[in-house]
Amino acid sequence: MLSDAELSRYARQLPLPGWGPDGQRKLTDARVVVAGAGGLGSSVLTCLAAAGVGYIRIVDSDTVEMGNLNRQTLYTTGDIGKLKAPAARDRLAMLNPDIEVVSLAESISGENLSDVVAGCHLIVDALDNLPTRLLLNEVAVSRGLPLFHGAVYGFQGSATTVVPPQTPCLRCLYQGAVPGKVPVVGVTPAVIGTVEATEVVKFLLGMGDLLTGRLLMYDGLGMRFSEVKVKKDPDCQTCGQHHLPGGKPGR
Ligand SMILES: [Zn+2]
């Protein structure tokens, strides 16, 4: 049963076909980890908290800087110098006090990867670098946790959804060079983060078609969305059959 406050807060989404109190309960019962509380994270976290996802773990070791504020809309000028993860937690708690938001102000590494995802049903990749994304991808594939990926560059962005073991993983997709820090305008992570949050909500509710096996590409200057198919690489270092736990040993 939803409380009167919940019925009121979610009144505009509950009437959607396939949603209702049962759908809302799926969101309330969900435990998600959002890796990165920057531009993408600002958008994803706000959408998920507002929609009523019941438990959100924010992982980010950075502090708020002036140069973040063109796109990281969770923060204000008064937050400069504060750790992002607890500042984001406090902001989301004001937005929706009925959910639980916890912060982990740590850099993600092989050592703490297990703690980062512990007890969560899915992982949102709101990071800004490929090596850490691939770490998340490895733990997602090895534990069968869905991974929602987004990336931005200037006015361009992309997103895809990984649901192991059926779908291609991020390693199947990214085998090339690793870009460094990239220029980003504030509107782009807002768009791509919202796409990621939409995917999370659809996944939790079991609605619609996910971005699995597809890379959605957004061109803000031309204002076009397009997509390319992503194939599962049978020899993938992460999800290929020779590399999965219990699979055959590597050649
Ligand atoms: Zn793969």
Image (tube, rainbow, N blue to C red):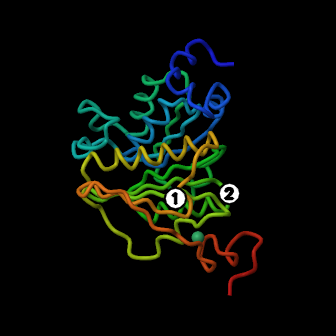
At x 57%, y 25%, the residue is: 14
Disc 2 and disc 1 in contact, CB within 8 angstroms? no
Q: What amino acid does circle 2 point to? A: Gly
Q: Quadrant of the C terminus?
A: bottom right
Using the image, tell me which numbered label, if any, was put on residue 109: 1
At x 58%, y 46%, the residue is: 208
Mark 2 element type: loop
User: Foreground residue, 108 or 221?
Assistant: 221
Using the image, tell me which numbered label, if any, was put on residue 144: 2
- Residue 27 in sight in this render: yes
N-terminal of the pair, mark 2 or mark 1, is 1
For residue 130, side relative to residue 220 (left or right)? right
At x 63%, y 70%, the residue is: 239
- Report which quarter residue 169 is drawn in: bottom right
Farthest residue, direction bottom: 251
The quadrant of the rendered image in which ligand 1 is seen is bottom right
Q: In the rendering, at what x and y percent does residue 9 appear? A: 51, 19
Q: In the rendering, at what x and y percent does residue 60 appear? A: 43, 46
- Report which quarter residue 27 is drawn in: top right
Q: In the rendering, at what x and y percent does residue 173 appear? A: 49, 70
User: Foreground residue, 58 or 171?
Assistant: 171
For residue 223, side relative to residue 102 (left or right)? left
- Report which quarter residue 44 is drawn in: top left
Q: CA distance from mark 2 to mark 1?
A: 19 Å
Around disc 2, counting alpha carbons within 10 Å, would you say few (fewer than 14), some (14 to 19), or many (20 or more)?
some
The mark closer to the camera, 2 or 1, is 2
Q: What amino acid does circle 1 point to? A: Ser
Farthest residue, direction front: 17
Using the image, tell me which numbered label, if any, was put on residue 204: none
